[in-house]
Image: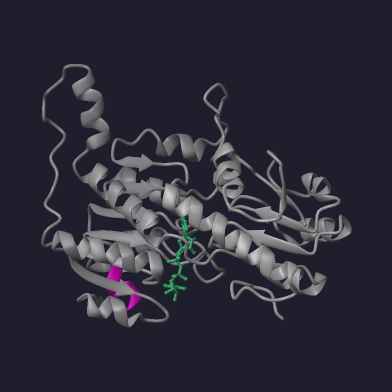
Amino acid sequence: MKVAVFSAKPYDQASLGAVQCPLTWHYLEPKLDVETAKLAHGHQVVVAFVNDDLSAPVLAELKKAGVKMVALRCAGFNNLDLDAANALGIRVARVPAYSPEAVAEHAIALIMMLNRRLHRAYNRVRENNFSLDGLLGFNLHGKTAAVIGTGAIGLATARILAGFGCTLTGFDVKPNPAFSALGGQYLGFDQCIEGADIISLHCPLTPDTYHLINAQRLGAMKRGVMLINTSRGALLDTQAAIDALKSGQLGYLGLDVYEQEGDLFFEDLSNRIIPDDVFQRLLTFPNVVITGHQGYFTQEALSAIACTTVQNIEAFAKGGRSGNELTKA
Ligand code: NAI
């Protein structure tokens, strides 16, 4: 079976290529969109990633090209029009939980970096500047950390935060008994964000969670709060975050995802002018750390993604269902 892999980087080729299977991979560097969908011609399966466009017009192009299945090599599927996939009869599967610890550990890395100002300390020491002015942190022990979305990644994050001695609060539309078992206390959303010293977002991006953190909610948080988003960029109204950073209401911001990341992330743009003024403004703050959607990027996660992607495609090839399908039977 021929499989077209979009947005394929060398590390994707290495991890997919390492799985023993009879699939024929065709690695395509471009992102999937309405133009590049034609490249899928002659392939029954397309493998796509977080910033590939799987909107209705793109799915229609894939259908015309003869594609019968889309295998997402990620957990989130906010970039996919599921109704359109169902209507077109294109089967879709994803990798629901490949390594929650990978993303959780990255969220913690952002917390530690911001709190102890490691991004600034690193540069200072390299210039023989050993002054501590401006590097003052706080103990995580005893602080209240709110986890928004206590699924696989939220729970893994909560486990680490519990180890630091944080008081855990959480909000989820579907409470997870494992979070309560850790000592986490579920609160209403507003109460949860209003009482926290650190807030970490781990819920999916859906129409309900678009700009979940907006100006009004930022205003209701504790002054100087730390906000971490490793989930999806559009959970946060970025302009509102900039305003809150300027006023000091938001004390720290750690992002692994960004609303308009599709135009930026995963590419080397170091020789280009970035036209996104909102992103550029974010980079000017000393209390903002941004990484380019690398939360998932560990060896363990890449091999788990590759294995599950192959299982999903093989189940489809055999006329079965993998259990990771998003589309209806
Ligand atoms: P999961 O499905 O295990 O957990 C998501 C949780 O969010 C569930 O408990 C669900 O009930 C809850 N939820 C849904 N709507 C909510 C709402 N309106 N308010 C509060 N909670 C809500 O998913 P998992 O594996 O924990 O992933 C979470 C998100 O992390 C993904 O949707 C994806 O966007 C992001 N992600 C980011 C990665 C990165 O590299 N930065 C990698 C993998 C996932």
* Front one among 265 and 306: 306
Residue at image x 43%, y 36%?
A: 281
Q: Quadrant of the N terminus?
A: bottom right
Q: Main secondary structure of the magenta part?
A: helix
Depicted 239 relative to depicted 71: above or below:
above
Q: Position of residue 115 (x, y in %)?
A: 21, 45
Residue at image x 42%, y 52%?
A: 300
Q: Quadrant of residue 130?
A: top left
Kindly give the residue lying farthest to the right in the view shown.
Answer: 64
* Front one among 307 and 122: 307
Depicted 261 relative to depicted 270: above or below:
below
In screen coordinates, is 34 left or right of 153?
right
In screen coordinates, is 317 left or right of 212?
right
Regarding residue 43, the answer to whether it shows in the image is yes
* Front one among 198 and 249: 198
Q: Position of residue 41 (x, y in %)?
A: 85, 50
Q: Quadrant of the C terminus?
A: bottom right
Residue at image x 21%, y 59%?
A: 197
Which stretch did the figure color magenta? 188-193
The total number of labels drawn is 0
Regarding residue 295, the answer to whether it shows in the image is no
Q: Position of residue 125 (x, y in %)?
A: 19, 23
* Front one among 106 and 204: 106
Q: Quadrant of residue 284?
A: top left
